[in-house]
Image: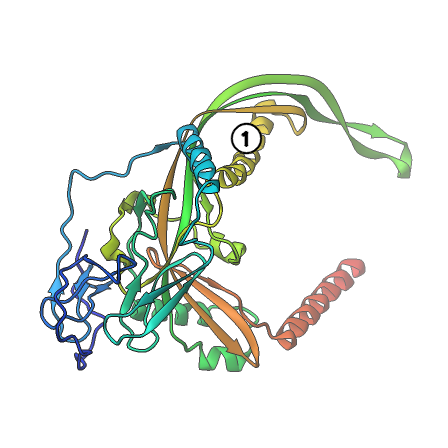
C-alpha cells in the first residue's frame, strides 16, 4: 500500500489520564468486551490515519506502522458449506442462552475516561462521546457464530480531500438554489465501514422466445399513401454459460440504497485481508442481511443481466422471451467491509444525506432544488419550441 505524506492531524493536544495502563497493542480489555491499540508513547488510543495509512496517536503524535503479511490472501468461501454451518449454529443457539446478541445492546467501559458506552444493533466500533477515544466491540466482525470478515478496502480519501470533492459536487449541481451553492455544505464527515457480500456464480441459462424482424409495406393511395411497419416473428431457443464475478450486495439495512449504489464502482482489487487496526477511530457495522438473503438479491441482478444476454442472442429488431431457466453452480462468496464518508446536513430545516466513496472520492447525496430555476427553464424551452414550430409552419 502507498503511504502519502499528508496527515489529518494538527497540533497534539493533551492526552487523557492514562496512568497505570499496561496494555499492549491489540490487547483485549474490559473482560474481553473491548479492543484498543494503546500508544507506546503516552498510553492513549491510537487511531488509523488515512493520509499516512498507519496508526497515529492524536495526542503525542506517536506513529505505528502497519505490517502486512505478503502471504495473506482473501479467499473465496464456499456458499453451500457456509449455509450448512449457519443452520448448525441456529440449532445450537436455540438450545443455549445468548448473553451478547448482536441485534441488541452491549455496554463497553472506556479505559481512557471511565465512561460506559452503549453499542446498539450492528455497530461494532465507535468513539467515546466523552473523551473521543476509539472503542471497539471485541471480535464484532469475527464472532464465533457469525460469518467473519474476509477482507476490507481501507480508507484512502482523507476528510480534507472529501470536503474538496464535496465543494466541486455542489458547484456542479444544476437547478440548485443560488444561496445553497454560494454557502456550500459545512459539517463533519463520519467514516464508517459498511458490510457487503460479494458472490461468484457459474450460471447455465436455457431459454425460448421469439425473434422479430421488421419490414415495411406501402398502404393506401394518393394522399392516403403511407409506409407502415410490420414485424415477422420466428421461434428462437438456446442455452449458454456465463460466469459472474463479485456481484456486490449491501449487507446493511436502513440505508439509502439508491445513494449507496451510486458510489459504485468499487476498486475491489485493492481489498486487503481483514485487519482490526484499520477500524481504529472509525465507525463500523456488521452485517444485518443474512448470507442467503443476500444471494437472493444477487440472483435478481444476475437474472437482469442474463435477460439482456438472451435478447442479444435472439437477435432481430425485437425480442420476446417466453421462458428463461437459470441454474447456478460453484457459488462462492466473500464478506467485505467497504469505506464510506457519511454526513447529514440541513438546508432550510430539511434534512439531507451525503455519501462519499472513501476509496475513490465519488460523491453522491440528496440535494435541494430551485423550483424557480426549473420553472423558468421549462418556460424557456416551451418558448423556443413554439418559435421553431411557428417558423416551420410559415415555410
Residue visible at 35% across and 75% down?
Answer: 129
Residue 122, by quadrant, is bottom left
Label 1: element kind: helix
Tell me: residue 109, above or below residue 309. Answer: below
Q: Is residue 246 visible?
A: no
Residue 336 image position (x, y, % from top left): 36, 46
Residue visible at 75% across and 65% down?
Answer: 386
Number of numbered discs: 1
Tell me: residue 126, above or below residue 13. Answer: above
Toward the viewer: 50 or 369?
Answer: 50
Residue visible at 68% across and 73% down?
Answer: 375
Residue 269, by quadrant, is top left
Mark 1, other Cα within 10 Å: few <14 / some 14–19 / many ≥20: many
Toward the viewer: 101 or 346?
Answer: 101
Residue 184, by quadrant, is bottom left
Residue 378 image position (x, y, % from top left): 68, 68
Q: Is residue 328 left or right of residue 13?
A: right
Residue 50 image position (x, y, % from top left): 24, 62
| Scheme of image coloration | rainbow
Residue at the far left: name it.
Answer: 41
Residue visible at 35% across and 50% down?
Answer: 337
Q: Is residue 269 left or right of residue 20?
A: right
Q: Is residue 228 visible?
A: yes
Residue 308 image position (x, y, % from top left): 57, 32
- Please name the residue that numbered disc 1 is placed on: 306
Quarter of the image with the C terminus is bottom right
Amino acid at each position: 500500500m502507498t503511504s502519502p505524506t499528508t496527515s489529518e492531524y494538527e497540533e497534539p493536544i493533551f492526552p487523557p489520564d492514562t496512568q497505570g495502563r499496561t496494555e499492549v497493542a491489540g490487547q483485549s480489555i474490559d473482560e474481553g468486551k473491548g479492543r484498543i491499540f494503546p500508544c507506546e508513547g503516552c498510553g492513549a488510543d491510537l487511531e488509523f490515519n488515512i493520509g499516512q495509512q498507519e496508526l497515529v496517536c492524536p495526542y503525542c503524535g506517536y506513529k505505528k506502522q502497519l505490517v502486512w503479511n505478503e502471504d495473506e490472501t482473501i479467499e473465496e468461501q464456499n456458499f453451500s458449506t457456509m449455509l450448512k454451518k449457519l443452520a448448525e449454529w441456529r440449532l445450537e443457539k436455540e438450545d443455549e442462552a445468548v448473553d451478547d446478541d448482536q441485534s441488541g445492546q452491549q455496554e463497553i467501559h472506556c479505559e481512557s475516561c471511565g465512561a460506559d458506552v452503549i453499542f446498539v444493533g450492528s455497530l461494532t466500533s465507535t468513539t467515546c462521546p466523552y473523551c473521543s477515544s476509539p472503542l471497539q466491540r471485541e471480535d464484532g466482525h469475527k464472532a464465533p457464530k457469525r460469518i467473519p470478515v474476509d477482507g476490507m478496502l481501507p480508507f484512502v480519501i482523507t476528510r480534507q480531500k472529501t470536503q474538496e470533492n464535496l465543494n466541486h459536487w455542489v458547484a456542479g449541481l444544476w437547478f440548485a438554489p443560488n444561496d445553497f451553492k454560494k454557502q456550500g455544505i459545512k459539517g463533519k464527515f463520519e467514516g464508517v465501514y459498511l458490510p457487503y457480500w460479494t458472490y461468484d456464480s457459474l450460471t447455465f441459462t436455457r431459454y425460448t422466445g421469439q425473434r422479430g424482424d421488421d419490414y415495411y409495406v406501402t398502404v393506401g393511395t394518393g394522399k392516403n399513401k403511407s409506409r407502415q411497419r410490420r414485424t415477422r416473428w420466428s421461434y428462437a431457443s438456446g442455452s449458454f454459460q456465463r460466469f459472474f464475478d463479485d456481484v456486490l450486495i449491501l449487507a446493511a439495512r436502513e440505508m439509502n440504497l439508491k445513494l449507496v449504489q451510486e458510489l459504485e464502482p468499487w476498486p475491489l482489487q485493492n481489498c486487503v485481508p481483514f485487519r482490526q487496526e484499520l477500524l481504529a477511530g472509525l465507525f463500523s457495522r456488521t452485517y444485518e442481511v443474512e448470507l442467503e438473503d443476500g444471494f437472493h438479491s444477487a440472483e435478481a441482478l444476475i437474472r437482469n443481466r442474463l435477460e439482456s444476454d438472451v435478447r442479444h442472442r435472439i437477435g432481430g429488431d425485437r425480442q420476446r422471451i417466453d421462458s428463461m431457466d437459470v441454474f447456478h453452480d460453484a457459488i462462492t462468496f466473500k464478506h467485505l467491509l467497504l469505506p464510506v464518508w457519511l454526513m447529514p446536513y440541513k438546508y432550510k430545516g430539511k434534512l439531507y444525506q451525503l455519501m462519499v466513496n472513501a476509496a475513490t472520492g465519488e460523491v453522491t447525496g440528496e440535494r435541494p432544488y430551485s423550483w424557480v430555476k426549473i420553472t423558468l427553464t421549462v418556460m424557456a424551452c416551451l418558448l423556443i419550441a413554439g418559435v421553431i414550430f411557428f417558423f416551420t409552419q410559415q415555410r
